[in-house]
Amino acid sequence: MSARASCRLAALVSSPDEARRALEGGADYVLAPARRDRPALGVPDRLRETGEQTLFAVAADEALPAEPRRVRSVEAPADPADFRREGVAILLLDPGRPLLRALSLEVLANQVAACHAAGVECWFGGALELPDLPRLTALNPDALVVEGFDAEALAEARRMLEPPPEPSPGAPTDLIRMTNLVLSARVGAYGFERDRAQRLRFSVEAAVRRPSAGVPRAIGEVYSYDIVMDAARRLCERGHTDLVETLAEELAGELLADPRLVEVMVRVEKLDLGPEAVGIEIRRAKGAVHSA
């Protein structure tokens, strides 16, 4: 699943000064609580509400909607069709604690899919840090909501949400390795394999073109190995798969959808069938296919 170039950056703020700094720092939206005891932050009186779960998104960019947008915040996945019927076009999933520790990647991906099917934007918040951003953009949300970022962090977040640039001439190719990630999954063609989960071991090597030569200094200048681990976890969380070969091909295909990747090796092994391990190893490249 590749990241969408349209993923926006929103900042949760509590004062007009904080809103101004966030917009100047690169945020597409500022989110203001719709409460009477808070500053209006540009939200017209006729739109104010007393509900703790309703916020308003205010944008400075002329390319974005000028009218403040209602945002309904929920702490757990919800049916977006219910909010659509209420006239709410944006659902913000924010569990009130670190998002990626509160909810699985598959749950988050399913929430995005449900929102888009209902014609509702899906935003993610929840104590987000810079390393979380590439992991979440891989799920195709419409916006990510940060809080408490200073000007430097906002600028870096803005860069991280932009499409990766084409590598410059002479840019190095890095080899990203993920070795022996053991996950539980339902996989196998035999009947007894359908009744229980078993351990799978994933190893990946990915050749990644860096955008420029020189020593990387910021997290947005490198490819995150978390993306590789997250993709493997999502495959294991989705339900039963007959063949480990299917998992290997789908993992390779998802990783190669990123324009920075040149080639990938994927090894998937079963660990609970008697020998130490049985499985498959494949190598795939953009424009070429061959088995290891």
Image (tube, grey):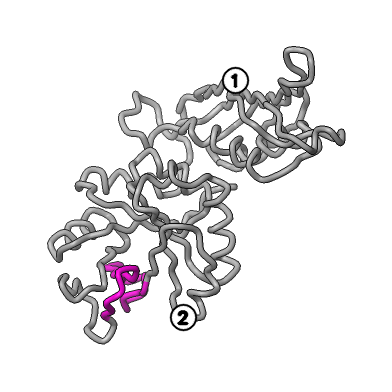
Point 43% across, 69% down: residue? 90
The residue lying at 28 percent from left, 70 percent from top is 58
Question: Is residue 238 positioned above or below 68 on the image?
Answer: above
In the picture, the disc for residue 180 is 1
The residues bearing labels 2 and 1 have C-alpha atoms spaced at a distance of: 47 Å
Counting from the top left corner in percent of width and height, residue 30 is at 27, 63
Q: In this figure, which residue is indicated by the disc labeled 2?
A: 86
Q: Are marks 2 and 1 in contact (CB under 8 Å)?
A: no
- In front here: 188 or 61? 188
Q: Quadrant of residue 168?
A: top left
The foreground one among 91 and 248 is 91
Instruction: State whether residue 165 appears in this view.
Output: no
Picture quadrant of residue 228: top right
The quarter of the image holding the C terminus is: top right
**Residue at far top of view:** 276
Q: Nearer the viewer, mark 2 or mark 1?
A: 2
**Residue placed at 35% from the left, 25% from the top?**
214
Q: Amino acid at mark 2?
A: Glu
Q: Disc 1 residue type?
A: Asn
Q: Secondary structure at mark 2?
A: loop
Q: Residues within 10 Å of mark 1 (few under 14, many from 20)?
A: some
Q: Residue 291 or 247: which is nearer the viewer? A: 247
Which SS does the magenta portion mostly show? loop
Q: Indicate yes or no whether the magenta region holds residue 50.
A: yes
The disc, 2 or 1, on the residue closer to the chain's N-terminal end is 2
Q: Give the residue at x 42% y 32%.
A: 222
Badge 2 density bin: few <14, some 14–19, many ≥20, Cα 10 Å = few
Place of residue 25 in the rendered image (x, y in percent of width and height, measured from the top left): 23, 53
Q: Residue 102, percent across and down?
A: 44, 45
Q: Which segment is the magenta one?
A: 48-70
